[in-house]
Image: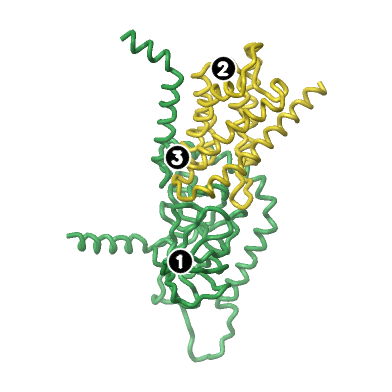
Chain colours: A yellow, B green
Amino acid sequence: MNRLVFQNIIRFLLLVLLQVLLLNKINLYGYLNPFVYILFILLLPFETPGWLLLVLSFITGFTIDIFSGTPGLHTAATVLAGFARPAVIKLVGEREEYDASMYPSLQNMGLKWFLTYTVILVFLHHAALNFLDVFSFTEFFRTLLRIIISTAFTVLFIILLQYIIVSRKGKR
Amino acid sequence: MRNILAFIVRFHFLLLFVLLEVVALAMFVNSTYFQQSAVLNSGNVITGKFYTSASNITGYFKLRRTNELLSIENAILRQGSDLSFLKTDSTSFWKKDTLYRQQYKYVIARVIHNSVGKRNNYIMLDKGKRFGIEKDMAVITPNGIAGTVISVSENFAWVMSVLNKHTRISARIRKNDQMGTVVWNGIDPSVGTLTDIPAHVKLSRGDTIVTSGFSNIFPAGLMLGTINDFRVEQGEHFYLIPFTFSVDFNSLDYVYIVKNLMKEEQDKLMQTTENQANE
């Protein structure tokens, strides 16, 4: 159990650093804003209690907000993603044989399952984030395009990260 | 009572979600315009230190470009200084005297955090109250204007970048002195939009847009960009003019914070006039 907590803290720190130092600076023609830190919420164990999931989402979003100078923006979007996570897991299909430490990763659940799960949650998160940021529906299609492109890039990045972690574990 | 408790236990997930979301949205709404929340200002110290150490490293990669910009600016300034003029008339001489009073002062600052990809972008600078930085000061670069200071802490300043939904800069076309307003429509960090130019004015591509100096914040005549394209939408009486920013917002490093020494006086005058009008 301790190992699990430790593992998640490290993951949290690495993802926040990656987001703040590297990905926040990526921008292509104003349409591409990957927010890979959401992977932290995606990879929490299945058995994470609901309240903890929400509190962790809040903390994650708030940390990113502090570093981006956008109070509440990432927090609201990430809490929404955390809230939706159990429903999405149910929707995509649960498995029977969970143990407490099992988490929804690519190597645990397979590519198809993980991809569906990731796309839904990342899209939800990015949609909330971008619409809040623009704070009106007047630029609807432009915002939608931004959401779709950013979602695609974030998902791609998350899948790549998962493969890198898998191959590293294989070597051990 | 037991029922309420049972209700809370039963729906704790939903209730907690609503609670956290309300907290987040409250933070968001209260800070959209001017990011002055206490949380952020105390957060400024931590994030400021963090970004300072990060930009200490990344700063090296921009050195060549920064030097280039500075030497170009130096050349321009040197050209205007007394030393580059040959005295041709020995009987009269020119000296700066009381006819000139300094209106603007400049403080050098470094950009330690910056973004261009969001709808509303902000910049963090490494100078704050301690260097006399205050809210509503202009932030400019050798190439043009970068933003406006919106909040300061002891050592850092938050700047609303020109790349922001709330940006409205009073501007003018240098060639014919037509007044307009510069806004940013949120896609391309290198393209801004000039509005409020009447449709009868003659324009051409490449015309220079500069600040009008009417805002008490930005000095007059600072470069904003050059016109890319212009069109009049159907049923409108004003042009829609996309233009290329002269500043590359993605590579901001050293900037000047401009202090308008007469701002207080200007503001006061405006306020008294407004008060009189309201009476």
- Crowding at label 1, few (<14), some or many (≥20) Cα neighbours within 10 Å? few
What subunit carries mark 3?
A: B
**Place of residue B136 in the rendered image (x, y in percent of width and height, measured from the top left):** 41, 55
In-image side of B202 versus B61 (left or right): left
- The reply to whether discs 1 and 2 touch (Cβ–Cβ < 8 Å) is no
For image coordinates 32% across by 60% down, the residue present is: B267
**Kind of residue indicated by mark 3:** Asn
Q: Which residue is mark 1?
A: B234
For residue B76, what is the image quadrant? Answer: bottom right
Q: Tag on residue A48? A: 2
The foreground one among B143 and B197 is: B197
For image coordinates 32% across by 63% down, the residue present is: B265
Q: Which residue is mark 3?
A: B41
**Kind of residue indicated by mark 2:** Thr
For residue A43, what is the image quadrant? Answer: top right
**Place of residue A85 in the rendered image (x, y in percent of width and height, measured from the top left):** 55, 25
Q: Nearer the viewer, mark 1 or mark 2?
A: 1
For image coordinates 48% across by 33% down, the residue present is: A76
- Crowding at label 2, few (<14), some or many (≥20) Cα neighbours within 10 Å? some
Q: Tag on residue A159? A: none
